[in-house]
């Protein structure tokens, strides 16, 4: 076995995928990759992506493996966010027993074609717009504020290596989709289970949040559920803008946050 192949076995972890761009960046020409495929040292489960042949991982082509491959082998970073992050943290009330049915990924550039083909409609891409200093848009995502935004699931295996939004960031990502994609009811059920959020981390994210709608919704839901962390937020330092936001046509106007909310939800 030649030295380049030995190196590839070290660089490409068991169960993960790499594309031609990554291989070329590490010194593997197209002709060399073709040679490895022909010789049975590499396999191409889908056009444009490769993995070690004879892979022993049970999750070799699982959604988790595809997403982790994107995070570890193909910059820029794509983080798992929103409802998917909450499910992976055990905080999603609608989680499926065999894992998330959708993967909400946030990053400066969309996933490559091969990943979109493998994940199909399970993949939902978002370009980060919520925060003025988002690590996902920085030259070095892990420099400054990374731990405020991202964490890892507590599960074992490949899943534990994923980079996902902290519950505080994931909540704001869900609220950003209300009411166009996520409903008030879905956000309400999710908030009900978020009794252990860090008020310090949530305040820092709210202070850096660009969206007046998201900030008002976060505080409205916090008041509605009355979790212990809600009273520890430095609300006076959060800019809530001015003017009314009609989020629920025909709903009632909440006078505290100047947003319309579903009438059936009652007062916060």
Image: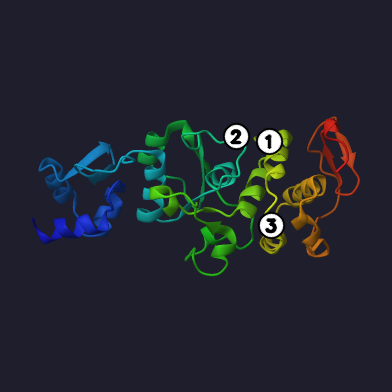
Quadrant holding the N terminus: bottom left
Label number found at residue 209: 3
- Please tell me how many numbered marks the rendered image carries: 3
* Residue at the extreme bottom: 144
Give the Cα distance between marks 2 and 1. Answer: 9 Å
What whole-number distance in Å separates the C-alpha atoms at marks 3 and 1?
A: 21 Å
- Neighbour tally class for label 1: few under 14, some 14-19, many 20 plus, Cα within 10 Å: some
Residue behind mark 2: 94
Q: Extreme right residue here?
A: 255
In the image, residue 84 lies at what x, y percent?
54, 42
On the rendered image, what quadrant is the C terminus found in?
A: top right
Element marked by disc 2? loop
Graded by Cα atoms within 10 Å as few (under 14), some (14 to 19) or many (20 or more), the crowding at tag 2 reads: some
**In the foreground, 47 or 167:** 167
Q: Nearer the viewer, mark 2 or mark 1?
A: 2
Which label's residue is closer to the chain start, 2 or 1? 2
- Of residue 69 and residue 128, the one placed in the foreground of this image is 69
> Residue 64 occupies which quadrant of the picture?
top left
Q: Which residue is mark 1?
A: 186
Residue 191, image quadrant: top right
């Amino acid at each position: 076995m030649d030295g380049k192949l030995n190196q590839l076995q070290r660089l490409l972890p068991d169960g993960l995928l790499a594309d031609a761009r990554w291989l070329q960046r590490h010194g593997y020409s197209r002709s060399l990759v073709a040679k490895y495929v022909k010789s049975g040292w590499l396999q191409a489960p889908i056009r444009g992506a490769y993995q070690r042949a004879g892979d022993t991982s049970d999750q070799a082509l699982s959604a988790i493996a595809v997403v982790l491959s994107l995070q570890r082998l193909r910059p820029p970073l794509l983080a798992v966010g929103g409802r998917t992050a909450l499910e992976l943290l055990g905080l999603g009330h609608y989680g499926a027993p065999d894992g998330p049915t959708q993967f909400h990924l946030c990053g400066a550039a969309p996933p490559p074609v091969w990943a979109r083909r493998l994940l199909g409609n399970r993949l939902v891409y978002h370009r980060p717009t919520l925060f003025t200093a988002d690590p996902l848009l920085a030259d070095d995502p892990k420099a400054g504020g990374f731990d405020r935004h991202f964490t890892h699931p507590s599960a074992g295996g490949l899943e534990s290596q994923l980079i996902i939004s902290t519950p505080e960031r994931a909540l704001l990502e869900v609220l950003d989709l209300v009411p166009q994609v996520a409903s008030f009811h879905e956000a309400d059920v999710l908030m009900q289970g978020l009794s252990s959020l860090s008020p310090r981390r949530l305040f820092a994210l709210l202070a850096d949040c660009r969206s007046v709608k998201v900030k008002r919704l976060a505080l409205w839901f916090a008041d509605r559920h009355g979790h212990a962390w809600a009273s520890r937020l430095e609300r006076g330092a959060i800019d809530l803008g001015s003017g009314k936001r009609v989020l629920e046509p025909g709903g009632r106007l909440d006078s505290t946050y100047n947003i319309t909310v579903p009438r059936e939800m009652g007062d916060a």
